[in-house]
Every structure is written in C-alpha cells, then in structure tokens.
Image (spheres, rainbow, N blue to C red):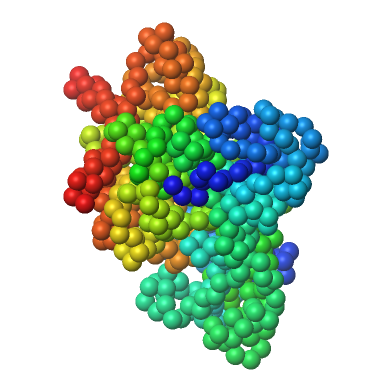
Amino acid sequence: MIILDENTKCVVQGITGKQGSFHTQSMLEYGTNIVAGTSPGKGGQNFQGVPVYNSIEETLEETEVNASVIFIPAPFAKDAAFEALSQLDTVVVITEHIPIHDTLEIVAYARENNKILIGPNTPGIITPGIGKLGIMPAHIFNPGDVGIVSRSGTLTYEVASQITQAGMGQSTCLGIGGDPVVGLDYSDILQRFQDDPETRAMVMIGEIGGNAEEKAAEFIAANIDKPVVAYIAGVTAPPGKRMGHAGAIIEGDSGTAQSKKTALENAGVKVADRPSQISELIKKLYKSS
Amino acid sequence: MIGMKIYEYQAKEIFKQEGIAIPRSKMVKNATDARQAAEEIGAPVAVKSQVLVGGRGKAGGIKFANNPEEAYEAAQKLLKMDIKGEMVYKLLIEEKLAIESEYYISVALDRSARQALIMASTAGGVDIEEVALRNPEQIFKVHVDPRQEFLPFLARDIARKMGVEGPLIPALGAVIFKIYRIFQKYDANLVEINPLVATSDGLVAADAKLDVDDDSLYRQKKLIHLQEGPMDEFAYVELDGDIAVIGNGAGLTLSGMDMLQIYGGKPATFLDIGGGASQQNIARALNLVLSNPQVKVVFLNVLGGITRADDVAMGIIDVMSRAERMVPLVIRLTGTNEEEGQRILKKAGVSFETSMEAAAQKAVEILDGIESKN
C-alpha cells in the first residue's frame, strides 16, 4: 500500500458542509481513521463522534493528524489547501472547478515543499481494508496486490470493479485528478508502487488530452520494472479543441489516444483495448513472471 | 480550465483598458454599418469576421477594402460565410496598419510544466505553428514561476533575447509585461497577439486572443456578461453516428464510445452528465439526445460514485413516460444504490445491463435489428 496506511490519521476540512458530512460518514463506515474535522466558527461541535475544530492549527494542538481531505467549495479551496499544506504532509483535494491560476500556486508550493498533494478534482485514494480518503464507492474494491493510478473518476471504478470481479484486488487505488495541473503525477505514483513491497503489478488509466501519459511512458521505460498494464479511453473521440496556436505549439502531436498507446507500448507496457482485458493481462503477466 | 473564448473585438477592448495600443476599429453587424465605419475610420480598412474558431485568415475570413464601397461588399460576402462550422454575425472594421515589422507574443498555460509559458518571436504575422515546427529557434520561450512577481525588467529581458534592439527592447518589454498582467488578472488560459505590429506610431496589437478559464468566471465579473447563452449543463458533443452515448464522467463516457466501436457501432453523441447528477439532470440529458433526429438508439452507461443509481432510474422512468419521441434505450446501471435503482427499473418493466461491454454490444445489436427492418 502507498500513502494511505495504518498510520494515517486524517482531518476532514469542510466536515460540516453538504459534501463533507456525507462523505465523512461514508469514510467512517469504511473504517477510515478520521480523527478530526475543521469548520471555522464551529469548533467544539462534533460530527458522528468526530470532534470539530476551527482550523488545522487548532486541530494539531489537540490531535496528531498527519493528513487532510478537503471538501471545500472551489472559491475557498486555495485557502484551505495552503492551510493544510503548510502544516500537514499529505493533502487530498476532492474539490472540482478550482480556478487554474489558484491550482498553479497550490501545486508549486506542494512540490517545492515535498508534500504529498493528491488532486485537485480527484475521487481520492483508497487502500482496501485500511480506509479511503475520498468519494469512491468502497464496495467495489478488495484488498490485493494491484496498484491503480488514474486521472479519471468513474472509469477507475469500472477498472477496479473488474479487477475485483476477476478475483484479484488492489493494494492502493488513487486518482491523480482530472484537472490539467495536479499535484502528484503518474510517475510520482508509479515510483511509489515500484517501491511498495505489497504491490505486484500496476494499472495506469488514462484518457485523451494533454501529455501526462506520454511523460509517464518515458518514466516507466527508465524506472519501472514491475509489470504495468494501461488502458486509454477516447480512441474514437474526434480531435478536441485546441488552445489557440500556443496550445498546439506546447503539446505538439501528443494528446491523441493513439499517441499515448504507442508511447506506452514502446515503454514495454501492455495496453488493453477494453477494461475487461486488464485483469486477463495481469494474470498472464503473473504467470510469466 | 475549459476556456471561454471571447471575440477579437472584446479582447481588444480589454487590451486597450490595460494600456496596449489597438488599431482604430468598430464592430458592426451589417454591411451598411460596415460602409459607415469605413468612412469614419478612413480607408483602407480590414474587414474581419468575428468568430471563435482558429485559422480565420486562412479560411478567407479577413478581407481588405480600399474604400467604403469595397468595405460594404466585403461585409456582404463575409456575413454569409460559414467559417469552419461557425456562422459570421459580427465584423470588425479596422484601420489597415502601415507595417514596419511584425512580432508574435503570447502567455499560455503550459500544463506539463505546471507554469505559465511566455513565447515571443520576431517571426510574427506568419503562421506561427509552421515557425514552431520548422524553425523552433526563432521562438524564444520562458516559464514564469506562479509565485514569483513578474517585474518589467523580466519582460525587457525577454524582448532582448527574442532578438530586437534599441528602443524596441523597452517597447516590446512593456507589451509583454502587460499581456502577462492580463493573463493573471483575467484568469486566462491564453493571451496572444499575432501579429504585434511596429508602426511609425509604435507597437499596435493587430490581433488579440484571450481564452479565459471557465472555472474562474465567478470572479471575473467584467467577463461573465460576455458569455453568450446559458452555461452548458453537460459536456455535450454531437458526432456523426447513430447511437447516443451518455455516461457519468468523461473517462467512462469516452470508454463507452470506444466499446461501441469495437462492436461495430458509431456514437451519435458524447454526453457526460458529470458527478452527482439528479433525477432531473438525467431526464434533461436523455431529452437532449432524443431531440437529435440522428439518434436511433441510446446507450446510457452509469457506474454511480456520487451519482446515485436510484436517481438515474427515476430520471429514466420519468422520460419514458413523457417523451414525445422515444428510441430503444440500452441501460447499464451499477454503483452507488444499485439495488434500489435496479429494483425501480424492474418494477417499471425496463431491462438493464450491469456490464458496460455487454450493454455496448446490445446497443449495436438493437441498431442492426432496426436497420435490417428498414
């Protein structure tokens, strides 16, 4: 397992909000170690037995949290993310639609200070049997030895549930986030799976747009020797909109499903044509190793 | 960060407010006003179609007129044009500049570097994408750290390194500094001037592109009124096939399209209902694709995370009982509250699948059945 393990003690930022309260309940039901929540002005209350504090600073005066999951609306998410990143090592930003200029600042700070930032716009992270920091439906996961990394939400659930149905399970499954700029990227996660003794194979799920998958392919070729299976959605999508001339100059020919598949195959990755093939490919790789 | 593009004449208005010189110009909507504008500005003028698609010039969307009558004629032609699928409703009548030299400058979000990228070139006015491919050394590029204050001296250094000399260094530096300020102030994905024209009166932005981050519009009060029509509820693209694909989440919806293709089907739509769609959202999504006469079968592919399968089922029943036009629906419904959702469908006699691939296959088989009858 990576990032989320037995030692993770989590605070929920925005625990009293609509999204925060709904998902806190679901995370608690799954057994996640949620030890605190924050909601400015509501310190001293409690939610489902979880104490609520006014800030991360106050939370740290009273508890030993080391991770945060953020359910704060987009206009206030930069503030919440900096509050968390300046005091904790692991931060999961579930919020979607954060202004990209805010995200640039959040991500720059996190990377410079070697923080584990997952998201924004992510379903979160789940280590089956340990807990989940996020919004994924827990029942489709099963403890196992396949690490899954994705920038999609529901497509990740599709793949994870098929792996579960095939009699296997996940060491950890996480979404890096669907926005064009995110904290940890594919390669950061793949390296962690490579170093994790409980992960035997990795699944990387991508989709059209940007060049994150191409960059990951280069990284895999140089650094990863555990088996990797990939799936890329959007083979049939027509070419998307471009960001004026500048977008085309920056990204060149990358971005199509074919460019991503080719790059991954050249890096020795098995690329599935459909989600149901992923578990078959993993089983084959297990037999041959 | 999907961008809201704004028209050239609107972008130029913003450039002007930020202290960048623009040509004398007027936006018009008919040929008579175009003639009038040409008279006021003083011929010769450029008559420029106002569209949001790129490659306008190559597509014939810009004409030049030596007198007001020619401007009238050019306007008549342009106002009937369809430029890459976009109808022309507005024209910008603009003084034709006496060009001494032309430059390219832009600030764009470079997603893989996670920073803004400034690009500047003395090879402006021509096809800059061609320059990037053939002579990449002619484009000077520099990233800007989002936490660093971008000061005027940095902009002047860029101007010097892109290859200009003398008074052009501070002059170009000032424009680069201003477009970076626009990039930040207006939450832009892209600010671009191509060409930036040197005239005897100084540097003038002959074109203007501004693409603004949709997710920032709530705090861009000056720009939000430029949004034409209501904001879209769904990510929706019409395609040339006959099976409508609806899904929750872009990745899953794309994957559904791909599965159709594997079984020999062709998608008619890409419609992502997003996360947490309500019964009403589902109903509106279904009605939207049903209103498309090209659609012969609907493939609804839902694996609920924050979307609840029971809400989806209620939305389906609602549309089936009331829709004016109905086609076969192939439903894949699993995930959060799936027992309840599937129970609702069963009770209403609606069949469903639990596997995306089985549902895609079924959608194609049903379509083949319809076509063999005809």
In the rendered view, tell whether residue B27 sits above or below residue A36.
below
Q: Quadrant of residue B128?
A: bottom left
On the picture, is B346 further left or further right than B215? left
Q: Residue at x 25, y 58 (%)?
A: A268
The quarter of the picture where the C terminus of chain B appears is top left
Furthest residue in direction bottom, as rendered: B166
In the rendered view, tell whether residue B142 sits above or below residue A217.
below
In the rendering, at what x and y percent does residue A42 appear?
79, 36
Which of B297/A207 is in front? A207
Q: How many marks?
A: 0
Q: Quadrant of residue A160?
A: top left
On the picture, is B259 further left or further right than A42? left
Q: Residue at x 40, y 79 (%)?
A: B135
In the rendering, at what x and y percent does residue A52 appear?
73, 36
Which of A64/A70 is in front? A64
In the rendering, at what x and y percent does residue B2 appear?
53, 50
| Camera sees residue A61 | yes
| Camera sees residue B33 | no
Q: Residue at x 56, y 53 (%)?
A: A117
Which of A87/A270 is in front? A87
In the rendered view, tell whether residue B195 sits above or below residue B91.
below
In the rendering, at what x and y percent does residue A238 appear?
36, 47
Which of A164/A241 is in front? A164
